Amino acid sequence: MSIAIITHHDCLLHDMAPGHPERPERLLAIDRHLVHRGYQYELSFHDAPLASREQLERVHDAAFVRALFEQAPREGVIALDPDTTMTPFTLNAARRAAGAVVEAVELLREGEAVRCFCSVRPPGHHATRRRAMGFCFFNNVAVGAAHALARGWSRVAICDFDVHHGNGTEDIFGGDPRVLLLSSFQHPFYPHTGAGSEYDNVVATPLPAGSDGPTFRAAVERDWLPRLEAFRPELVFVSAGFDAHRDDPLGGLDLLEDDYRWVTRRLLEVARRHADGRIVSTLEGGYDLEALGASVCAHIDALID
Ligand SMILES: [Zn+2]
C-alpha cells in the first residue's frame, strides 16, 4: 500500500527561537529516517497547499483567523503565549500544516490515496477556536476533519496519542455527534485539561506519569476500540504526536516505537472494517529527533501494511 506524504518547504522556515523544542530539524529527522528505511517506492510525496480562510473558519472564529493574518510580523517575532511565537514565516507554515490535512482528504476523495501522513509543523491540537497556544496556531486535524464533513462524510474519528491532551480539538468538536474524539495523554500535565470530559463524543484516556507500553495498550483496548467499533467511522484521523516516547525531553510517559506500530495497526483494523482502510494522520508533538524519526517510521510501517 502506497502512503501519501504531504509536506511543504514552508514548514521548515517557521523557527520560533534558538533552542525551542518545536524546531525545523524535527521534519528533517523524519525525512532522514524515511530515506534510511528505503521507503522511496512506497511513498508518494505531495505539496501541502495553503489552507484558505474559509477552511480555517470552519473550526476557528473568524476574528481569531483575521487576527493571525493581520498580526503576522514582517520582521521580528510576536509572542502569542510564552512558548508560541509568530515569525515572518509562521503564518504560511501554519496555513500549509492545516492545508496538508485538507489535501489528504482531497486525495482520499479523488481515490489517489487511501492512507496519508502529513509531515508538517507547527502542530495543531492545542489550538482552540479562539486561541493559539502550546506551539499550535491553527488546529490542523480539526481543519481536515471539518473539510471531510463538508465534503459529505458523516462520521469521522480523531485518535490523538500525543503525550499532551488535545484541548483545542476537544474545544472545537466537543458535543459534535459527527465526530468521535479519542485522546490518550499524561495526566496531570500540560495543558491540565481533558480528564473527565463533559461530552458524550469524547473518550478521555488519562495516563499517570511513567505509564509504559503495556499500560497504554491495555487502555486503548479498554477505552478506544469498543467506542470506535460502535461509532463505525467512515474516515479515521490520527493526531500523531510522538512525545509519549521514553526518550522525549518534554513528556513523562514510557512508550517505544513498537507501541506506535501497535496502536497504528489497531486503528488500521478499525479503518479496514468501517472506512475502506482510509486513514489521515498528521504530526503533532515529538521532540527527541531520533525517537521521533524512528517512531514515525514505525507508524508508517504499520500504515503501509
Ligand atoms: Zn505534545
Image (spheres, rainbow, N blue to C red):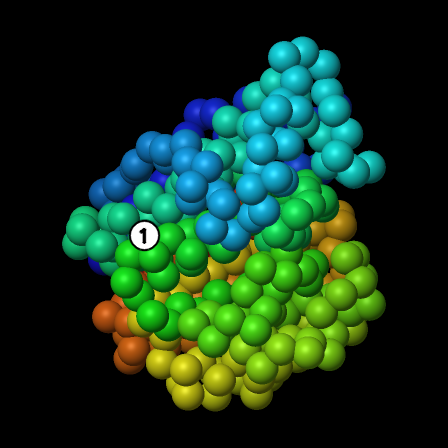
Residue furthest to the top in view is 75
Quadrant where the N terminus is found in the figure: bottom left
Residue at image coords 63%, 61%: 171
Q: Amino acid at mark 1?
A: Val
For label 1, being within 8 Å of ligand 1 is answered no
> Dot 1, how many residues are within 10 Å of its Cα: few (below 14), some (14-19), or many (20+)?
many
| Residue 244 seen anywhere in this rendered image of the structure | no
Residue 264 in the image, given as x and y percentages of width and height: 44, 67
Local secondary structure at mark 1: helix
Q: Is residue 92 above or below residue 109?
A: above
Q: Nearer the viewer, residue 25 or 231?
A: 231
Residue 230 in the image, given as x and y percentages of width and height: 41, 87
Residue at image coords 76%, 65%: 193
Q: Nearer the viewer, residue 290 or 115?
A: 115
Judging by the rendered image, the residue that carries numbered circle 1 is: 105
Q: Is residue 271 left or right of residue 121?
A: left
Q: Quadrant of residue 71?
A: top right
Residue furthest to the front in view is 63
Residue at image coords 48%, 34%: 95
Quadrant where the C terminus is found in the figure: bottom left
Residue 69 in the image, given as x and y percentages of width and height: 57, 28
| Residue 192 seen anywhere in this rendered image of the structure | yes
